[in-house]
Image: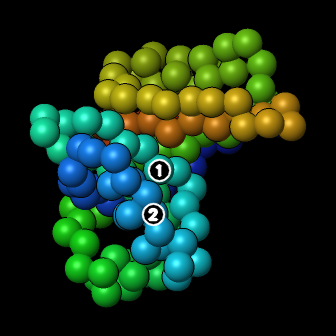
Amino acid sequence: MADKVRQVDYYNLRAPNRPGSGEKILNVFKKERVSFTAVHAFPNGKTTQVDLVPKNGRKFLRVARKARMRLSQKKKAFVAEGSDRAGGLVSVLEKISAEGINVTAVTGLAAGKGRYGAIFWVKPGDYRKAAKVLDAK
């Protein structure tokens, strides 16, 4: 499978940095059958930033509002998928680095069945240029 990159919308929220916080957030969406392309969380001071990439943005927003979650405005990232091989993500990253675009964060992993997946971010001012270089839809 050739590497494929697509644009995704995501939202973030702040949660207490303690046991059970992530489970509590995700359980709200589980009960309403909201699926995610990616969930990425990391400590940020005394809280945790949780980035949520919903598969269905409208349904996600409806559920989050009903649960009174304080979400960021919609933001953009990229998801890459391809055949799991040594350096699989390198071909994607080479394209944007050749244009002088810096990746601000990336998380990649083997997805099973010979595939990999990754989510990565660039600065908002570089997003359109990166999308064009990557032919990301």
* Image location of residue 119, percent across then percent down: 50, 39
Q: Is residue 52 left or right of residue 16?
A: right
- Residue pointed to by mark 2: 26
Residue at horizontal 48 percent and vertical 44 percent from the top: 78
- Residue pointed to by mark 1: 39
* Image location of residue 56, percent across then percent down: 53, 73
Check the image and report above or below for 116 versus 31: above
- Residue type, numbered disc 2: Leu
Camera-side residue: 36 or 124?
36
Camera-side residue: 107 or 93?
107
- Give the Cα separation between the discs numbered 1 and 2: 9 Å
- Residue type, numbered disc 1: Val
Image quadrant for the N terminus? top right
Check the image and report above or below for 70 versus 3: below
Q: Quadrant of residue 90?
A: top right
Camera-side residue: 53 or 121?
53
Q: Is there a contact, CB below 8 Å, between mark 1 and mark 2? A: yes
| Residue 16 showing in the rendered view | yes
Residue positioned most to the top: 86
